[in-house]
Amino acid sequence: MWALILLASLAGLLAILAIWINDQLLSNSASSQTSTALIQDAAVRRTLSVYLVDQLYANVDISSEIEQRLPSELKLLAAPAAAALESPAAQGVDLLLARPRVQALFVAAVTAAHEQLIDVLENKIGHGVTTGSGTVQVNLDQVLKEVGTDLGLPASAVNKLPANTGVITVMRSDQLGLAQTGVRAIRILSVWLIVLVLAILALALYLADGLRRKTLWTIGWAFVVVGLVVLVARRFIGDYVIGGLTTSEYAVPAQHVWVIGTTTLGELGWAVVFYGALIVIASILAGPTVPATALRRWTAPVLNNRPGIAWTVVGIAYILVILWGGTSALRTPIGILVLGALLAAGVYVLRRQTLREFPDTTAGPQLHAALSTAFGGIRSWTSSRRIATSWRIGRHRSTAEELAHLAALNESGALTDEEFARAKAHILP
C-alpha cells in the first residue's frame, strides 16, 4: 500500500512536468500570453533593447550616417558621436518597446516562430520538412526596422539591413529528431499519467481494508509533498539553469524569463498542495478525535435528514472556487473534474459515516432555530412586500373597504394576526 503511494507520487511529479510542457511550452495560445508578459517586463525590455541596438550598429554604419548630416568642419566628430549615442539609443529603444504597436510586432514575431516550431515538432509541415531538415527562427526584422525608423535612421539605411539581421535561431535541423519524439511522448504522458496516478491511489485505498482513513491521510500529505517539491524545484532549478547558461550581466532578465515561463508550473504546484490539503482535512474530519466527532454530530441532522441542503452548500462553494480560478488547474477541464470528484466523494463518505454513527439523529433545536431564523426573515420580508403591494393597489378604496379586505385576508390565513395589526395601523389615521 505504501509502495503504491510512493509510486503514485513519483508518477505525479512526471505528470506535472508533462502538463506544464504541454500546456505552456507547446501551446500557441500560451506562447502568445507568455511573449506578451515578456515584452511587458522591464528587465527583459532593457536586455532586448541592447540587443537591437547592437544589431543596428553591427549592420548600419552609424558613423557614416551621422557624418553625412554634419557640416564639413564637424565631420571628424562623427565617430565619437556614434559611440556616445549607443547607450542613449538603447534607452530610447527601451522606451519604444513599451509602446503597444512595437510590442505587438514582437508578440507577432515570437508567436509565428512558435507556431512554426510546433508544426515542425509535430511534423505537420510536410513537403520536405522532416526529421532531418528544417530550422526554426524568431525573426525580429520588423521590430528592428520599426525602432530604427523611430530612432531617426533614414529609410535608405533601414532598408539596407541584411535579411538575417535580428534573427534568433531556436532550433536547427540536427535537433529535430529527438525533439519530435519528445513532443509525442509529452502529448501522451500529460493525459495518461494522471489516469495512472488516480488508478494507483484507488488501488491503494482498496487494499487498505481497515486502514482507509489513515491511507487517505497519507495520500493527502503525499499530494502536499509533491506540490512543495515542484515549487522548491522551480526555484532552485531556475537558479541552477540561469547560473549555468547565462553570465552575471544577464542574470536578472534571465530570472524574469524563467519566472514568466514557469508560471503554469508554479500554479500546478500550488494546486496539488491545495488538493492535498482538502484530502488531509477530509481524513481528519472522518477521524476519532473529539473535535471531529463533535463536528460530525453537529452536521449529522443536515447530512442525514436534509442532504439536499448539504449538497447545495457544497455545490455553491464549488462553483465559487471554479469562478475564482486561482490556479491553472481550476481553469482546465481535468482540474475542475478532479476537484468536483473529491468534493462529491467527501460529502458521500461523510454522510455514510454520520448515518452509521448517529442513525437516530433528527433535526435538533439548533437546526430548527437556524432554519426558523432564515425562513422567518424571508417570510417577514415577503409579508411586508405583500402588505405594501396590497396598500398600493387598494389606495382607491375607502378605509372601510380596505379594512374589510384585510380582514378577509386574515380570516383566509394569508395574513397573520400580527401582520393584520400592522396593516390596520398603517391604514388608520
Image (spheres, grey):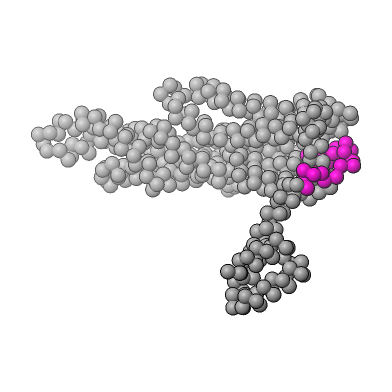
Quadrant the N terminus occupies:
top right
**Residue at left offset 68%, top offset 38%:** 190
Residue 192 image offset from top left, x and y in percent: 74, 38
Residue 25 image offset from top left, x and y in percent: 57, 38
**Residue at left offset 86%, top offset 27%:** 211
Q: Is residue 203 magenta?
A: no
Asked whether residue 280 is in view, the answer is yes
Q: Residue 13's quadrant in the figure? A: top right
Is residue 129 depicted above or below 282 in this figure?
below
Q: Who is closer to the viewer here, 302 or 109? A: 302
Residue 114 image offset from top left, x and y in percent: 53, 42
Is residue 358 depicted above or below 212 in this figure?
below
Q: Who is closer to the viewer here, 88 or 306? A: 306
Residue 364 shown left or right of residue 236 in the figure? right
Q: Which residues are magenta?
A: 345-368
Asked whether residue 116 is in view, the answer is no
Q: Is residue 357 magenta?
A: yes
Residue 401 shown left or right of residue 341 in the figure? left
Q: Residue 118's quadrant in the figure? A: top right
Residue 115 shown left or right of residue 100 in the figure? right
Quadrant the C terminus occupies:
bottom right
